[in-house]
C-alpha cells in the first residue's frame, strides 16, 4: 500500500526514499488499471464488454471502408474491372454500417448515460465508507487532507480517463494489427517511419504528462483555498456574517486573489517546458517526420522508382495520417496510464488506509455502567504540536455527575474526544470497567455514550432520522414515534414539534425540499440534545448543550436532565457556571492540566481560579 496518504504523525517509520516510491509507482501502473477494471466490470459487465467491442468495431470499420474498400474500388478503376464489382462492395459496406448503427445509438445515447453514473457511484460509495472510518488524526494533517480532497475530487475523472484509455488501447491494437499488417505487406520501410514516430512521441508525452501532473499537485492547495473562498460567498451559512462584516469578505477576496496569483505562478513555472514538449510532439514527431520525410519517400517510390502502383500509393498516403494518429494514441497510452495511475494510487491508498481505530474490532464492553478512569493521560494533536492535555488523572464512579470547566482552549472538548475514544492518548491510559478503552470495540463502546457536541450538525434528512441518526422507513418511524417524541420533548422541542405539519417526517433544511424547515440555532441544539436522550446510554456527555438556548429553555433542559440523567455517568461542559454548580464534582482545567477539583462549595472555599471565575460571572446568579 502506498504510504503517501498516511498521516505524518505516525512518524519516520513510514517515510520512504524517493527511489522506492518511483519504482513502486511504476510497478503499480498496471495494478491500478486492473483495480479500476475489476471495479467497473463488477458494476456493469455488459457495458464494459460493449465498450471494448465499440472501440474494436470503430477501427475495424475504418479499415474495412477506408483501406480495403477504397483500395478495392480504386484498383477496379485503375485496372478496368467491371463497375458492378465496385458497386457490390460499396453495397455490402453500407449494409454492415446500417446494421451497426442501431446498437451504436443505444450504446451512445442510453447505455453510457445509465452506466457511467453507476461506475462513479461504485467508487464513491467505497470512498464515502472509508471517509467515515478514517482516524480523525487524518483531518488534522494538512498534507493528508490535501491528498484526501484530491482523491475524492478526482475519482470520477479517474474512471473517465480509464474508460478512454481502454478505448484508446483497443483502437490502437486494432489499427496496429489491420493497417500495420497492410503496411508490412505493401511497404515495410513505412513501418520504420511510423515506429520512429511512435518511440519519439512516447518519450515526449511521458515528460509532458509528468510536468502536467506535478503542476496539478502544486496548484491543488491553492485551488482548495480558492474553492473555500467561493464556498464562503455562495453558502447561506456565511451570508449574514459577510453582510455584517464586509471586511471579512474583502479579506477573503484578497485571499482568493492571492490563491489565483499562486496558480498563475505555478502555471508560468512550467509554461516553457509545456510549449517545448508540445512543439516536439506536434511538429518534430508529427509534421516533420511523417508528413515531411515519409511522404517524400513515398512519392519518390511511386513516381521515380515505380515500385508501388498509384492506388496503393494513394492508400498508403491516406493511411499514414490515420496510422500516425493511432500510433500517437498508442504512444500516449503509457504516459496517460501513468498519469491516471498517480491519481488512482491516491484513491487506492485512501481506500487501503487501515484506521488505527477499527470500528468493529476489539473486546466486548461489559454490561451496565462502569467506572471510567484516566491515568496520566497526555495528548498532542500532532507529533510536533503542543501538549493539549497534560498528565490528567481522574476516576469517575458510575452515576457520578462531573462538570468540566475552564477558559477557552483549556482542553475540555479534547478531553471529551479522548473519553469517547475518537482519539487515543499520546501517553497514559483510559479505562472503562477496568478495561483499557483502547482494547474495546469502538462501535460497542460508542453505543454506551450519548453525546451532544458543541459543533453538532443537522443532516438533510427528516426530523426522526436526525434524532435516531439512522435511515428509517415510514413504518420504522411510526413504530418508534413515541420514544423519539419523548426524546424531543425532554430536550424542550415539544412546542415546535406540535407546530410542524409533518411532525417527525418534516424534512430538515430547505436546501433539497421546498417543504423542508430551517430550524433556529436553539431549535437545532434541542434536536442535537434529543439524540443523546434517545440513545439512553450509560454515559452522557454534554459539551455546551445550552449555548444557544434561551434562559427558560436552559432551565427546562436542566430539569429534563435530572430525569434523563438519573443513574447515568454525566460529563457536562459549560461556561455558565450556574448550570454546573450542582455537579457531584467540578474539574477545573487550565492549559490542559487539572488545576482544581471538588464540589462547588469546596472550590469556592479554596478561593482559587474557580472562585475567581465564579465571582467574575456566575455570582450574579446567586
Ligand atoms: N483538531 C485540532 N488540531 C490541533 N489543535 C487543536 C485541534 N482541536 C483543538 N485544538 C487545540 O487544542 C486546544 C484545546 O482545544 P479544546 O477545543 O479542547 O478547548 P476547550 O477547552 O474545549 O475550548 P472552548 O471552551 O473554547 O470550547 C486549543 O488550543 C485548540 O487550538
Image (spheres, rainbow, N blue to C red):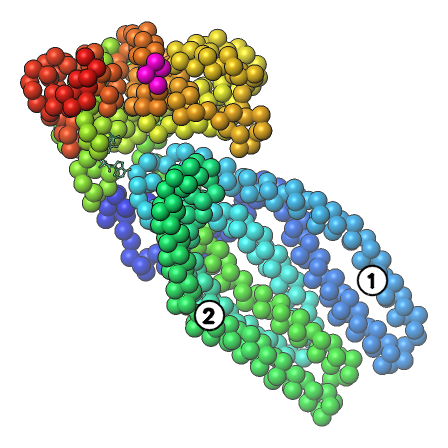
* Residue 74, above or below 136: below
Q: Residue at x 18, y 41 (%)?
A: 386
Q: Nearer the viewer, mark 2 or mark 1?
A: 2
Residue 524: tell me if it is visible: yes
In this image, 176 relative to 562: left or right?
right
Main secondary structure found in the magenta portion: helix
C-alpha distance separating marks 2 and 1: 43 Å
Along the line of sight, which residue is nearer the eye, 257 or 267? 257
* Residue 174, above or below 5: below
Q: Residues within 10 Å of mark 2 (few under 14, many from 20)?
A: some
Q: Residue at x 54, y 19 (%)?
A: 505
Magenta span includes 73? no
Q: Disc 1 marks which residue? A: 93
The image's mark for residue 274 is 2
In this image, 568 relative to 90: left or right?
left
Q: Position of residue 252 (x, y in %)?
A: 38, 49
Along the line of sight, which residue is nearer the eye, 329 or 556? 556
In this image, 94 relative to 17: left or right?
right
- Which of the 4 image quarters holds residue 585? top left
Q: Residue at x 35, y 47 (%)?
A: 247
User: Could you tell me which secondary element the residue under label 2 belongs to?
Assistant: helix
Q: Which residues are magenta?
A: 550-554
Quadrant containing ligand 1 reads top left
User: Could you tell me which secondary element the residue under label 1 belongs to?
Assistant: helix
Q: Residue at x 54, y 62 (%)?
A: 333
Q: Position of residue 221 (x, y in %)?
A: 38, 52
Q: Residues within 10 Å of mark 1 (few under 14, many from 20)?
A: some
Q: Count of labels shown?
A: 2
Q: Quadrant of the C terminus?
A: top left
Amino acid at each position: 500500500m502506498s504510504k503517501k496518504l498516511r498521516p505524518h504523525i505516525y512518524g519516520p517509520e513510514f517515510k520512504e526514499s524517493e527511489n522506492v516510491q518511483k519504482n513502486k509507482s511504476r510497478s503499480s501502473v498496471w495494478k491500478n488499471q486492473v483495480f479500476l477494471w475489476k471495479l467497473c466490470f463488477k458494476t456493469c459487465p455488459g457495458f464494459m464488454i460493449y465498450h471494448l467491442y465499440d472501440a474494436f468495431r470503430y477501427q475495424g470499420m475504418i479499415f474495412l471502408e477506408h483501406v480495403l474498400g477504397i483500395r478495392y474500388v480504386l484498383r477496379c478503376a485503375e485496372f478496368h474491372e467491371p463497375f458492378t464489382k465496385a458497386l457490390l462492395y460499396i453495397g455490402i459496406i453500407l449494409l454492415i454500417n446500417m446494421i451497426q448503427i442501431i446498437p451504436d445509438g443505444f450504446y451512445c445515447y442510453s447505455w453510457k448515460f445509465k452506466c457511467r453514473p453507476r461506475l462513479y457511484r461504485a467508487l464513491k460509495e467505497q470512498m464515502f465508507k472509508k471517509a467515515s472510518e478514517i482516524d480523525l488524526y487524518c483531518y488534522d494533517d494538512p498534507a493528508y487532507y490535501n491528498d484526501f480532497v484530491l482523491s475524492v475530487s478526482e475519482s470520477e475523472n479517474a474512471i473517465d480517463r480509464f474508460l478512454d484509455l481502454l478505448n484508446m488501447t483497443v483502437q490502437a491494437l486494432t489499427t496496429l494489427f489491420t493497417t500495420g499488417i497492410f503496411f508490412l505487406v505493401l511497404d515495410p520501410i513505412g513501418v520504420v517511419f511510423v515506429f520512429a514516430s511512435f518511440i519519439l512521441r512516447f518519450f515526449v508525452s511521458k515528460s509532458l504528462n509528468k510536468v502536467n501532473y506535478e503542476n496539478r499537485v502544486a496548484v491543488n492547495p491553492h485551488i482548495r483555498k480558492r474553492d473555500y473562498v467561493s464556498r464562503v460567498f455562495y453558502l447561506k451559512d456565511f451570508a449574514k456574517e459577510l453582510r455584517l462584516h464586509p471586511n471579512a469578505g474583502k479579506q477573503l477576496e484578497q485571499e482568493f486573489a492571492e490563491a489565483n496569483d499562486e496558480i498563475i505562478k505555478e502555471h508560468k513555472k512550467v509554461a516553457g517546458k509545456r510549449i517545448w514538449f508540445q512543439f516536439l510532439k506536434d511538429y518534430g514527431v508529427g509534421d516533420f517526420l511523417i508528413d515531411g520525410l515519409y511522404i517524400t519517400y513515398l512519392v519518390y517510390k511511386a513516381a521515380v522508382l515505380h515500385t508501388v502502383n498509384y492506388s496503393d500509393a494513394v492508400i498508403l498516403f491516406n493511411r499514414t495520417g490515420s496510422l500516425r494518429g493511432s500510433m500517437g494514441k498508442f504512444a500516449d497510452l503509457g504516459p496517460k496510464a501513468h498519469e491516471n495511475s498517480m491519481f488512482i494510487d491516491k484513491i487506492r491508498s485512501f481506500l487501503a488506509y487501515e484506521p488505527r481505530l477499527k470500528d468493529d474490532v476489539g473486546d466486548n464492553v461489559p454490561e451496565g455502567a462502569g467506572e471510567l478512569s484516566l491515568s496520566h493521560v497526555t495528548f498532542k494533536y500532532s507529533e510536533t504540536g503542543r501538549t493539549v492535555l497534560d498528565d490528567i488523572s481522574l476516576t469517575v464512579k458510575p452515576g457520578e455527575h462531573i462538570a468540566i470547566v475552564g477558559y477557552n482552549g483549556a482542553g475540555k472538548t479534547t478531553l471529551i474526544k479522548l473519553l469517547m475514544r475518537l482519539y487515543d492518548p499520546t501517553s497514559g491510559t483510559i479505562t472503562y470497567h477496568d478495561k483499557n478503552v483502547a482494547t474495546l470495540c469502538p462501535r460497542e463502546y460508542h453505543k454506551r455514550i450519548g453525546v451532544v457536541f458543541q459543533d453538532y450538525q443537522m443532516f438533510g434528512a427528516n426530523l426522526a432520522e436526525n434524532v435516531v441518526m439512522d435511515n428509517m422507513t415510514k413504518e420504522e418511524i411510526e413504530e418508534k414515534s413515541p420514544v423519539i417524541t419523548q426524546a424531543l420533548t425532554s430536550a424542550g422541542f415539544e412546542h415546535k414539534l406540535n407546530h410542524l405539519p409533518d411532525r417527525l417526517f418534516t424534512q430538515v433544511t430547505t436546501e433539497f425540499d421546498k417543504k423542508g424547515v430551517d430550524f433556529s440555532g436553539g431549535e437545532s441544539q434541542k434536536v442535537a440534545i434529543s439524540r443523546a436522550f434517545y440513545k439512553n446510554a450509560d454515559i452522557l456527555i454534554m459539551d455546551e448543550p445550552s449555548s444557544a438556548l434561551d434562559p427558560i429553555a436552559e432551565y427546562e433542559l436542566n430539569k429534563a436532565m435530572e430525569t434523563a440523567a438519573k443513574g447515568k455517568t454525566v460529563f457536562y461542559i459549560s461556561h455558565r457556571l450556574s448550570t454546573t454548580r450542582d455537579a457531584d464534582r467540578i474539574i477545573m482545567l487550565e492549559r490542559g492540566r487539572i488545576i482544581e477539583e471538588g464540589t462547588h462549595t469546596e472550590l469556592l472555599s479554596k478561593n482559587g481560579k474557580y472562585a475567581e471565575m465564579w465571582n467574575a460571572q456566575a455570582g450574579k446568579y446567586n
